[in-house]
Amino acid sequence: GRCPAEALFDRLVKINITYGLDLTEDDLVKIVQRAVDLGNRDLANFSTPDHAVFLSNTWNLLPESNISLRNNRAFRISDFAFALKKMTDFFESLDPQLIYLSFRESEGRQR
């Protein structure tokens, strides 16, 4: 299938036409490249050689992606177990070859 960056580019082309934004193809390519770079930087800790940094960031994501853990005073053990299960499922579904994207000569961060 098509990569997410190509799909984003196609949507931007349609938006550019629909709303008469007068952006050039080069403008649209640069926009998508910036989006890809932002996404790759957001995932930078996935390739850190320091496992402690990676694990620390992973723990920090639990409350971000699980509303029930945002209450700092109390949460149920079952909420924590469910959050860990979701995190485990997420990591098991990752394909390390596809984490970082690139778009038209903009290389993803490959470490």
Image (spheres, helix red, strand yellow):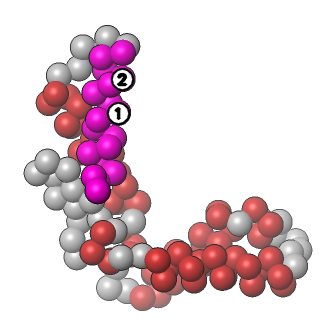
Residue occupied by mark 1: 11
Where is residue 43? Give x, y as percent.
Answer: 39, 66
Pointer 2 with pointer 1, Cβ within 8 A: yes
Residue 77 visible at all: yes
What's the residue at 23%, 65% (across, down)? Answer: 109
- Please give the residue where the numbered disc 2 appears in the rendered image: 15
Residue 3 lies in the magenta-colored region: yes
Q: Is the residue 28 above or below the residue 65 in the image?
A: above
Regarding residue 36, the answer to whether it shows in the image is no
Vertical arrangement, residue 83 with respect to residue 71, above or below: below
Q: Which element type, helix, strand or loop, lies under badge 2?
A: helix
Closer to us: 81 or 41:
81
- Looking at the image, the residue that sits furthest to the left is 105
To which quarter of the image does residue 107 belong?
bottom left
Q: Residue at the spot x=30%, y=17% of the render?
A: 17
Q: CA distance from mark 2 to mark 1?
A: 6 Å
Relative to 103, 67 lies left or right: right
The amino acid marked with disc number 1 is Arg
35 up-or-down from 16: above or below: below
Q: Which residues are magenta?
A: 1-18
The C terminus lies in quadrant: bottom left
Q: Looking at the image, is 16 positioned above or below residue 26?
A: above
Callout 1 secondary element: helix
